[in-house]
Amino acid sequence: MADSIDGNVLAAKSLAKFGVQHMFGVVGIPVTSLATRAVSLGIRFLAFHNEQSAGYAASAYGYLTGQPGILLTVSGPGCVHGLAGLSNAMANAWPMVLISGSCDQKDFGRGDFQELDQIAAVKPFSKFSVKAKDIREIPNCVAQVLDWAASGRPGGCYLDLPSDVLHQRVSEAEAENLLTEAEKSRVKDGEGMASLQIPKIGEVASLLRHAQRPLIVCGKGAAYARAEDALKKLVETTGIPFLPTPMGKGLLPDTHELAATAARSLAIGKCDVALVVGARLNWLLHFGEPPKWSKDVKFILVDISKEEIELRKPHVGLVGDAKQILEKINKEIKDDPFCLGKSHPWVEAISGKAKDNVSKMEAQLGKDVVPFNFMTPMRIIRDAILALGSPAPIVVSEGANTMDVGRSVLIQTEPRTRLDAGTWGTMGVGLGYCIAAAVASPGRLVVAVEGDSGFGFSAIEVETLVRYQLPVIVIVFNNGGVYGGDRRSPEEVNGPYKDDPAPTSFVPNAGYHILIEAFGGKGYIVKTPEELKSALSEGFSARKPAVINVIIDPFAGAESGRLQHKN
């Protein structure tokens, strides 16, 4: 057919027309041409070694940009590997689209190459799934998955592109008409404030005004909504202490005088009214239940999802966009202002407890412990990051002890500059998140602070860092295993395989820094404060891919799985 295009080109044109700027994935039959065509149309394609890491990148990209991250995979096992990222996006409520090739429709059910009912496979992990059964359906299908991913509560969507559809052809004129019609049919999300009843805003303002011990809890949903300015105005106008969730850190600086992070147990245990913005009352917040929370606390939940409000049954529930709702609360309070003030007993209690806990932690951090524990290198990393000023680096944190210690020690001063294991506690996200952060925020350095176990999930992607010359510094806390080497008691060392390494053990003092050197990156091995400071200074200045292998005492860590808050 003269002047015609195939399904690969039409899919690439659809993605480009509807605003996609980056894609992540692993190419192969039948989607290699789709990736190539997308690049020729101005979409940057980040090619990974493993679909799992590429999927994590796509999910984090959605969070950082507010636009659906796109993962492209081959059929069958490629699609299955992509489910890691898709499910991570759903758990964290981040917009993402998984696009997979699939076998010829006429051969489905006959044992075709990489055959799988992919629509059924993705169902538990996607908001919306669709298969383009004919080339003419591609533009509308692309528009649908992009819109569904970002509407309401964000999440993952799936687009299935059979091999035969990718090879079908239409004229260029018909293709342009299909693209135009698909664009016209797109529905802009209007859910935001639709169900918000204005009288509830007055009730919220009244509850906060008359509370004796109010608290504002802000989560990554508020960060996603770009609610930082409205949140800052509310906190500083009312004088109410605030508590960020781990990825809500940075919405207001951790150093803010009203930050309650270092007095978390007191804040949630004694508050009588809690305004929770963009955070779910799940395990991260102890389900909002005693004994961590007071049995009499009144929750005001702000969430984009009506279902979330109905599940939690708060005292007051506001369904809508976090930024818009906070702006309305600010407007309501402006008409009848109030402020707790620094001398308010509640503010004094939070401030005093926070200062006391920070002083205790700083006393620990002030000691140079060699061989390294977790605290000494984390302090050095914190100080090096803070010295960079603004724009602050994006910190990617994963691991057990490494993430737990880092959450308390590392300081976030700007929104959306901390990525970690998130709602699902997902390990293996590190390198994918690093790559997403580097392309989503090109003006920022990316610093990963990872345990050796977390790093191992996706370590080969350091080649991807080097290939694209991304400004990523990966710091590996190397303590020889999961939680730290062999922790078995003598009575546990039994059986015919007792001489095998422990299930938690890795090769001691592994040369992780050498891995990146194989691809032309820079590697460092550090065992002392001076060596770590030198490596950080050189790496941060160069802004080139590097791995800093920090040797940690294997007995410095402990088993960790849930958030451990001792303050």
Image: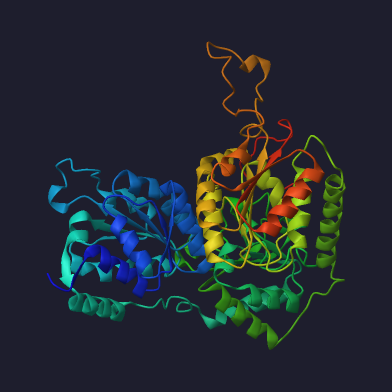
Q: Is residue 567 visible?
A: no
Query: Hey, which quadrant is residue 299 in on the image?
Result: bottom right
Name the residue: 50% across, 73% down: 320
Query: Residue 382 at what x, y percent from top left?
Result: 75, 54
Of the pair 100 and 331, the residue shown nearer to us? 100
Query: Which image quarter holds the N terminus?
Result: bottom left
Answer with left or right where residue 66 lies relative to residue 549. Answer: left
Name the residue: 76% across, 61% down: 386
Query: Residue 107 at what x, y percent from top left?
Result: 14, 47
Residue 248 vs 501, above or below: the answer is: below
Query: Hey, which quadrant is residue 271 in on the image?
Result: bottom right
Of the pair 147 and 263, the residue shown nearer to us? 147
Query: Residue 44 at what x, y percent from top left?
Result: 43, 64
Work out which residue is located at the far front of the displayed protein and give it: 520
Answer with left or right where residue 255 lies relative to residue 477. Answer: right
Of the pair 88 and 38, the residue shown nearer to us? 38
Work out which residue is located at the far bottom of the displayed protein and give it: 335
Residue 428 vs 446, above or below: the answer is: above
Query: Residue 124 at what x, y percent from top left?
Result: 36, 51
Name the residue: 17% across, 51% down: 104
Colouring mode (rainbow / by chain / secondary structure / one colour): rainbow
Q: Is residue 236 visible?
A: yes
Answer with left or right where residue 122 lies relative to residue 96. Answer: left
